[in-house]
Image: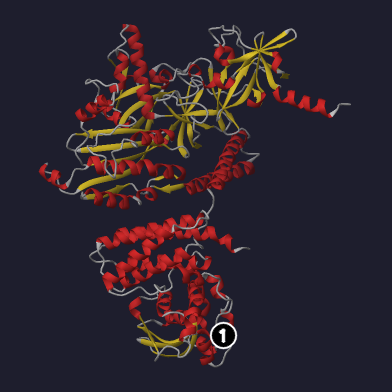
């Protein structure tokens, strides 16, 4: 049985706790804010777009809406990029756009407390720390928390028409 | 149901009436005003007044009343029109619009403006026809009396003695003479009069039919109502003897509420009718058979466009369009499945599918057309803009519009108005020279401004062209330097012209009322880019400037031809396809290394292999195994090499830029029958893309990076 005070305290910490969707790229685990996720579906029927960067797989039809599909595995230079029944597309709401990202698999939804989120160190050429919101430490696991908004709207993703073009 | 439920209808109707009024005012020939147009303007004012009275919008009612009176004098030829009078009328119309907006937003209309406009109108009446306007007496305060809803049964209908009725309501006895009115119209008129008062006697023939009426309505109100049916010249209304005696004092206050009665919309006016009708068989005598018909005719007139159009919110239409789009896709999917079944055993199913297909297409077409409105909707407001701006600037300008029937999506037409207005003002101010300057340059004094619209491929081109002095390269460059923009003398003309879109840029010598503050052109460009379009400028010194807005049709269906290259399906806009043929080896000529031209009936066309431009793998590369589709885009013809022609179909255009970005060589996307996405090719851009790719390849070979810049100067 909980007293009212502990309940209030619990609510307060719950406010700060954030839920993340954890997905894997190769052996690495990444996490994104669950509120950005619209749905998860299989990888199918993607129409290639000519003259686009390699990691933009093309566009697909999501119930009448044309949605671009980005393969994060290619973007992050993973060695093994295969498409099969297990390949998953996470459909995200980024800004006012809908974008799908291809990942190797979705594992679970995690709640992280503020204490579990560590600042991201300065590293990486492939994934600039600008696009990271931190590292989540969970016992023996480490989750890379991706600021998916920033990443997908960045110039290098070439998903958005750059200003003045 | 509350009366406020009708407000919206009134506002929208009034807005349309005001728009009508403005159009007629602008078209009006001051020297020889067309009676029909004057009547139309009068009727618009009258209808607004009626509605305003019913809903208790005093200020609006008051203003329209004065305006209406003035218009009435004009109509009767007692007031001679002049340009400045028309201007005053236009100003009044604007004021009415402001008042309408105020009421719509639940605000009190600007009292000061109201008084000012009343004064202006009174002044005009005094000066021009030397008399005060009727109704001037019951200025603001008294107008309130007109507002309340009319009494359900204002007429003392069953009263056998007319005198008693007169005394009670302060009625007057009038003789209404109908001159040269046919039997049918007469029936209508008598019926109208019946509603306005009590008919005491009626007699006469077609040439002159006299009706004696006891009524509380003013003579001009009766006339106003009558004028819906006959010309004012056919009417003569005069009091019989003197106005009702004794009741004069009582008459005035009583008149006000009655005043609203004749103008009230059908509903309240109809209510007292059965009551007055019953005890008066004489009045009905003329043509009993004609009655239902007459009544119907009147209803149609009073109801305006109600029977022919309905107002629907745009969201509802959009929802239908989306649903129909989905339906079409589902239908195509079914179609594909059914086509695999054999025809003999499933002939019923096949027939059903064919029918469904036809119906679905018809439905789609019908729904799409709902959202499209002609550019006339936009262009029609420019005569006013041009007239006023030209007047202010002291220039003589003729406005020409072309392609007003070109249809554009409604949401775009609404958003294009502001940028277009700005461009027009700019052309008038900076583009077209003053008459004297023009004369000196050997041009006609009257400048010409052309607004045009046309469809081209998946775009609509809207052009504002003037025959003025053209842009001044030196001046723009000098100004740009002053504004510390990064410029050089070697810039191409196109680049220089684009400078005028820079924020804060203006070459006008003086800041005028019209333009020259340097805010605007950048906003214009931003707005148009916001719609997914772009702005091009073409200018020749001494000959004029054309500003072209290219807008994509964000929402449209397209007649497409599906083609296959390798394993990929693309859609070509059918409008761009001229013909397709199987090229033979003899007709293909290599040129300058890797360029190929195709000879088609004595014409040599450049060849663009789709697989090269769009990097399709697994396509047929042997030229004579492919199919050449001859296409035309922005005046240029070329041959597209594809693997296979799949078929023709209507496709729903889906914007790629909603979630992605512009793709070179592609205008939009669509969803095919199997649910997959196919790209719609942009014929003009594809040619450009192919060229720049070729040059890039050549550049790589020659290791000369200069080739990239050639793309920029290529005429578009």
Q: Is residue B276 left or right of residue B497?
A: right
* Residue designated by label 1: B156
The quadrant holding residue A85 is top right
Quarter of the image where the N terminus of chain B is located: bottom right
- The residue at 34%/19% (across/down) is B691
B425 or B116, which lies in front?
A: B116
Chain to which mark 1 belongs: B
- Vertical order, A86 against B144 (above or below): above
Q: Residue B209: where, in percent of width, then height?
A: 39, 87
- Vertical order, B245 against B489 (above or below): below
Q: Is residue B523 left or right of residue A22?
A: left
Q: Residue B84: where, in percent of width, then height?
A: 26, 60
Q: Residue B624: where, in percent of width, then height?
A: 38, 20
User: Can the viewer see residue B560?
Assistant: yes
Number of dots carrying numbers: 1
Quarter of the image where the C terminus of chain B is located: top left
């Amino acid at each position: 049985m909980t007293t009212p005070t502990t309940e209030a305290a619990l609510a307060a910490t719950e406010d700060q706790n954030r839920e993340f969707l954890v997905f894997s790229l190769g052996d690495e685990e990444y996490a994104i804010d669950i509120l950005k996720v619209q749905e998860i579906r299989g990888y199918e029927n993607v129409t290639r777009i000519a003259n686009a960067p390699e990691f933009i797989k093309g566009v697909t039809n999501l119930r009448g809406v044309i949605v671009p599909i980005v393969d994060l595995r290619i973007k992050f230079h993973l060695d093994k990029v295969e498409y099969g029944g297990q390949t998953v597309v996470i459909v995200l709401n980024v800004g006012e756009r809908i974008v799908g990202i291809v990942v190797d698999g979705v594992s679970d939804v995690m709640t992280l407390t503020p204490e579990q989120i560590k600042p991201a160190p300065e590293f990486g050429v492939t994934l600039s720390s600008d696009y990271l919101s931190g590292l989540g430490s969970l016992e023996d696991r480490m989750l890379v928390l991706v600021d998916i908004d920033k990443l997908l709207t960045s110039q290098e993703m070439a998903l958005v028409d750059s200003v003045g073009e | 149901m509350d009366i406020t439920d009708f407000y919206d209808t009134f506002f929208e109707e009034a807005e349309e009436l005001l728009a009508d009024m403005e159009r007629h005012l602008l078209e009006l020939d001051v020297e020889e005003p067309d009676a029909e147009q004057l009547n139309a303007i009068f009727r618009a004012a009258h209808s607004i007044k009626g509605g305003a009275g019913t809903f208790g919008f005093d200020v609006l009612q008051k203003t329209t009343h004065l305006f209406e009176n003035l218009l009435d004098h004009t109509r009767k030829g007692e007031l001679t029109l002049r340009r400045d009078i028309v201007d005053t009328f236009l100003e009044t119309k604007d004021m009415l619009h402001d008042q309408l907006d105020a009421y719509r937003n639940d605000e009190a209309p600007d009292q000061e403006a109201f008084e000012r406009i009343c004064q202006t109108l009174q002044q005009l009446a005094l000066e021009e026809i030397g008399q005060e306007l009727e109704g001037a007496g019951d200025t603001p305060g008294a107008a309130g009396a007109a507002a309340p809803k009319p009494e359900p049964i204002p007429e003392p209908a069953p009263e056998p003695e007319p005198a008693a009725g007169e005394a009670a309501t302060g009625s007057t006895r009038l003789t209404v003479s109908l001159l040269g009115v046919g039997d049918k119209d007469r029936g209508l008129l008598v019926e109208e009069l019946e509603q306005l008062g009590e008919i005491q006697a009626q007699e006469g023939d077609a040439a002159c039919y006299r009706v004696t009426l006891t009524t509380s309505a003013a003579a001009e109100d009766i006339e106003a109502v009558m004028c819906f049916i006959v010309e004012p010249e056919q009417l003569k209304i005069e009091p019989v003897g003197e106005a009702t005696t004794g009741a004069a004092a009582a008459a005035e206050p009583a008149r006000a509420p009655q005043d609203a009665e004749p103008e009230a919309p059908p509903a309240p006016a109809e209510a007292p009718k059965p009551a007055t009708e019953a005890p008066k068989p004489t009045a009905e005598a003329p043509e009993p058979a004609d009655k239902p018909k007459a009544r119907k005719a009147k209803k149609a007139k009073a109801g305006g466009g109600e029977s022919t159009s309905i107002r629907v919110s745009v969201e509802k239409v959009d929802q239908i369009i989306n649903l129909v789009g989905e339906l079409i896709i589902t239908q195509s999917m079914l179609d594909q499945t059914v086509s695999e079944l054999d025809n003999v055993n499933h002939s019923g199913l096949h027939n059903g599918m064919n029918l469904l297909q036809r119906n679905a297409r018809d439905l789609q077409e019908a729904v799409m057309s709902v959202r499209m409105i002609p550019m006339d909707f936009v262009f029609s407001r420019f005569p006013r803009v041009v007239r006023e701006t030209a007047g202010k600037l002291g220039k003589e300008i003729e406005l020409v519009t072309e392609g007003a029937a070109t249809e554009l999506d409604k949401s775009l037409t609404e958003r294009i108005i502001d940028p277009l207005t700005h461009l027009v003002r700019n052309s008038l101010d900076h583009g077209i020279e003053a008459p004297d300057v023009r004369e000196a340059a050997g041009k006609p004094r009257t400048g010409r401004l052309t607004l045009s619209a046309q469809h081209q491929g998946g775009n609509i081109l809207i052009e504002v062209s003037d025959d003025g002095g053209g842009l001044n390269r030196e001046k723009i460059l000098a100004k740009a330097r002053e504004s510390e923009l990064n410029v050089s003398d070697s810039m191409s003309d196109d680049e220089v012209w684009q400078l005028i879109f820079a924020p804060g840029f203006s070459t006008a010598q003086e800041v005028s009322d019209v333009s020259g503050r340097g805010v605007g052109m950048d906003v214009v460009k931003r707005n148009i880019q916001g719609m997914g379009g772009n702005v091009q400028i073409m200018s020749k010194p001494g000959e004029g400037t054309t500003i072209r807005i290219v807008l994509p049709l964000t929402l449209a269906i397209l007649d497409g031809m599906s083609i296959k290259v390798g394993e990929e399906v693309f859609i070509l806009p059918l409008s761009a396809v001229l013909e397709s043929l199987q090229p033979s080896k003899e007709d293909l000529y290599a040129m300058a290394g890797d360029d190929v031209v195709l000879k088609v009936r004595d014409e040599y066309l450049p060849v663009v292999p789709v697989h090269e431009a769009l990097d399709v793998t697994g396509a047929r590369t042997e030229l004579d195994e492919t199919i050449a589709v001859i296409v035309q885009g922005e005046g240029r013809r070329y041959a597209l090499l594809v693997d296979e022609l799949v078929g023709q179909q209507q496709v729903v255009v889906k914007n790629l830029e909603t979630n992605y970005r512009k793709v070179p060589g592609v205008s939009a996307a669509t969803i095919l029958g199997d649910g997959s996405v196919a790209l719609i090719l942009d014929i003009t851009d594809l040619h450009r893309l192919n060229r720049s790719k070729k040059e890039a390849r050549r550049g790589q070979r020659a290791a000369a990076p200069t080739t990239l810049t050639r793309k920029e100067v290529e005429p578009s």
